[in-house]
Image (cartoon, grey):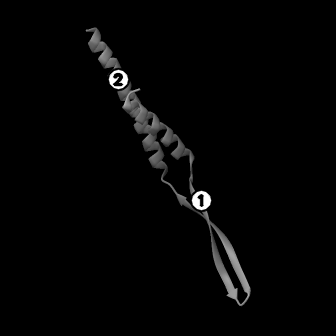
Amino acid sequence: MNRRLIIAIVLIVLGVAASAYQGIAYTTWAQLIDIGPSRMTVQKSETIPRLPILGFVALAGGIAMMVVCGMRRVLVQVNKQI
């Protein structure tokens, strides 16, 4: 396989994965009250969002690279026949 074709496939896979994935979620604990032996904590769920455009750009770039690789193969075969 051509190196560019492998990169194109990787970009397509990453683009699809990034488009399907919403972001990174994590949980933190915050202490509300600390009076003597009594403590009260609260659990907060937060999400680090990702930009959806990055997934679509990677997908479009991978598809474009596959098209370019395919066109080069056709042009090389045509030139060999001439």
Q: What residue is disc 2 on?
A: 71
Q: Find residue 51 and report its horizontal and vertical position in percent.
A: 48, 53
Q: What residue is disc 1 on?
A: 25
Going from the N terminus, do you reach mark 1 or mark 2 first?
A: 1
| Residue found at x 29% / y 9% | 81
Q: How many marks?
A: 2
Q: Quadrant of residue 41?
A: bottom right
**Residue kind at label 2, given as amino acid type:** Met
- SS class, disc 1: strand
Q: Find residue 18 and report its horizontal and vertical position in percent.
A: 51, 46
Q: Find residue 57 and report its horizontal and vertical position in percent.
A: 42, 43
Answer with left or right where residue 28 lies relative to residue 39.
Answer: left
Q: Is residue 59 above or below residue 32?
A: above
* Pointers 1 and 2 in contact (C-beta within 8 Å): no
- SS class, disc 2: helix
| Residue found at x 70% / y 89% | 35
